[in-house]
Image (cartoon, rainbow, N blue to C red):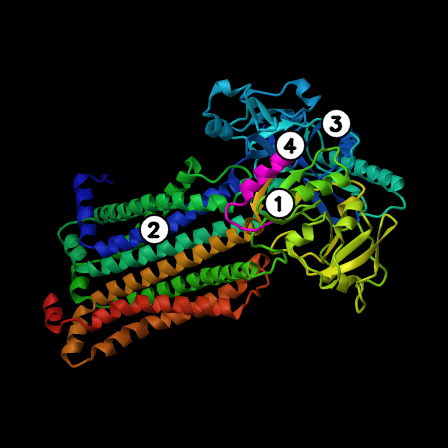
Amino acid sequence: MRLANRRDVTQAWRSLGRAPFYTITLAGVVALSLALATTVFAVVDGVLFKPLPYRQADRLFAVTLGRHDRPDSLRPFSPISPAEFHEWSSILPDGRLTAFSFGDSQPVGVHDFVRATRVDAAFFDVIGMRPVIGGFAPDDFLATGPIPPALVTWRFWRDRLGADPSAIGRSLVDDHGQGIRIVGVLPQDFVFPLPVKSPDVLVPRVDATPRGLGRSLAVLVRLAPSARVEEASARLAAAAAAWANTQSSSSSGTTGPAPDDAAGILPLRRALTEGRTEKPWMAFGTALALLLVACLNFSSLAVARISRQWRDLAVRRALGATYVDLLRLLTLEHSVIVMVGAAAGSLGAYLLLAIMRDLIDGMYTVLKPPAIDLRVIAFLALASIACVIAVTAVAARAATRASLRSAIADGGHATRRGRRWFSIVTFEVAAALVMTVVGALVAGSLMRVWNEDPGLDVDHTAVVSITPPTDASAADVEALMSVAGHLPGVAAAGGAAHSILEGAFNGSVFDTPHGATRPAPGQGFPPIESIPITHGYLGAAGLRPLAGRLPTDEEFRTGVPVVVVSQRVARRYWPGRQAIGQTLTYDGRPFTVVGVVADAKYLALDLDEAGEIYWPVAASPTPSVSRLLVRFTSSRDAVTPFVANLRRACPQCWVGRAETVTDALGDSIRPRRFSAWLFSAFGIAALAITGVGILGLVAMTTSRRTREMGIRIALGARAATITRQIVGEQLRSIVLGLAIGGLVAAYVVRFVAAYLYKTPTYDPWAWGAAIAVLLTVATMGALVPARRAGRVNPVQALNAE
């Protein structure tokens, strides 16, 4: 087969130039579908396909912890205590363990913080990677200080330090003398082995309290090639059971959750993606389905165009053109359209990724951040080539049937082509309805989440991470809260010992009272959160007593054993009774309920606790706070000045991340925002492709009937009659497509039920809106060319042939 020359390319350009609507429409369809498919592939590539960037990654395992009586409780990266890790350090003769923190903020300048994680001396040996520049020294793991040594990521070194080699040894500190000393740079492809956003710096983990019982460490294991996974898992399980027995014996008579007594190991790849692959696979499958619809649309319009050129192709065949010549011409035309669409699609994918990076921040950056790299470009090229091959194969089959006799007679093909167009429109409408229904359900679910009442005072309120001095007493913490509450622009401020709107379950330290409502068999309640707070917190949260009173400032300062419960706790613990005056017990100490307040959301906007119990920080065995809730007199640019004033007021305090409650609420539902954006984009794209496809198909098929329309109008047919006839012909395929799509969607929506919040999978509003919009778009796609056909000039129509 002769390759295309310049003359062939020029001929293809001229042929497409004579049909600008056809060319622009198909290029737009290809661009839209490729933009979305490429964007989705760039996101899911790091989750589903890209290999782990570690040496012998198949020998890396994450430790799972849980309860032996609840096998479903075994979870990878479950936190363990330094004391527990110390006991485990020698139980695997054929493996090495490393423990690291889950991350926090680290100052790197005045009012400048980055994500940081503490790693031990075995970390790089276990994961099988090394810094490309510098590294930690053995002494770095022996002592800590206000300016610890740090390894920075390649991105941090490039963007913040200008990739300057002389930056090694430089210290980045804030105005309190805290910060980091750069001792090395991590590899460009370094990804931290946790299913969260990678840290910007690594600092040494110093075992200042190797016997500490606070659970704050994740553990990885590297097994030797000869080691058996089952044996290593059994050793860890025995160690976990022995540790749990020891802790249960030493803490007999106290309350609190039982320690984990079961352990195992899970391949790192599976641990990183566990529970996170279903949505990427669904998104990738939907993207491929959208590409299929676009290619089918392309094919149908290409065949319709060939039907219009039937006589021209037949004349070429009669004058000696071979099948190969026709195939070459079609391939060139379709390649030009796809290349233009691919170029526009790659630009669209680049723009879409800029939007999606914010939505997936900390969610799906497991193996690589989404970017247009060589793997993504290869996917784009393969998808484009596949589209060209498929469309050309379909179009060539129609083109090579052209003969001069059949073109002049033009008989025997109308019925078959009519059935083909009917099937194509039916399939497109069915596929579009499935995508539109899913998008409408997920988008409606997000709207319901946003309409939830968080129970907190959202306006003019911010959450600030704070760590008081290590030797601060309960009185010192309360005094610090008083200082914060009297800073300029502050209406109220108070501290809490738990995170706020970060999805972290803490549970309750109080015993469940006798007579509390029990869950039904097979069901359970969400956990109750007991939150140690300081004075001023309830006022900053906007929580007012619905019954009883709030603790006084003096009760907060002195740690009087009183509690305030939310409405859900009151109903569950004392059904049908008055909560005021009841008693809750913690470690054998009675706490009196003095007030009832409204329920609030402290985990996420779409997560419900079974209620909250507020009690004084000063009554806790370890009085401290980690979050500060602040309500300002004005919301305009109030957070940054407050943080600066707080640092000046308490130089010994570490003040970290600060964000408004509105931003925190948005971050807490980031996965839902991602799902809504993604599936809504697919639905909108399917609507656009279907509408444009029907419009183009009807326009091109009715143009072949110009002579017929002219004759009918000349014989007295009204334009409205012809318009109704053409639209009616298409409505049959549209309605059938809606029926088939509805049946398929009824099955598919079951797979998105987990992503819906208080939205039934067969929500009539979402389904009705999807069907109505699709029916409108499809009908308009048929109506526009039908109206043009009804206004044809009979004389011109008869002379056209």
Give the image location of residue 655, x and y in percent: 62, 37
Looking at the picture, tell me which residue is in the foreground, 511 or 338.
Answer: 511
- The three-letter code of the residue at mark 1 reads Glu
Q: Earlier in the sequence, mark 1 or mark 3?
A: 3
Q: Which label was assigned to residue 467?
A: none
- The three-letter code of the residue at mark 3 reads Ala
Q: Which label was assigned to residue 30?
A: 2
Query: Which-is-in-front pick, marks 4 and 3?
Result: 4
For this view, does 134 lie left or right of residue 514? left
Badges 2 and 3: C-beta atoms under 8 Å apart?
A: no
Above or below 92: residue 264:
below
For this view, does 25 lie left or right of residue 128? left
Label 4, label 2: how many angstroms apart (C-alpha)?
A: 59 Å
Q: Which residue is mark 4?
A: 651
Label 2, label 1: how many angstroms apart (C-alpha)?
A: 34 Å
- The three-letter code of the residue at mark 4 reads Pro
Q: Quadrant location of residue 473?
A: top right
- The three-letter code of the residue at mark 2 reads Val
Q: Which residue is mark 1?
A: 274
Give the image location of residue 82, x and y in percent: 75, 32
Q: Rate crowding at label 2 as few (under 14), some (14 to 19) or many (20 or more) other CA atoms within 10 Å.
A: many
Q: Rate crowding at label 4 as few (under 14), some (14 to 19) or many (20 or more) other CA atoms within 10 Å.
A: some
Q: Quadrant of the N terminus?
A: top left
Q: Which residue is mark 3?
A: 208
Q: Earlier in the sequence, mark 2 or mark 3?
A: 2
Give the magenta-colored segment's residue range.
631-656
Element under disc 1: loop
Element under disc 4: loop
Label 2, label 3: how many angstroms apart (C-alpha)?
A: 60 Å
Give the image location of residue 167, x and y in percent: 51, 20
Looking at the picture, tell me which residue is in the foreground, 655 or 383.
Answer: 655
Residue under the image location 69 percent in, 40 percent down: 480
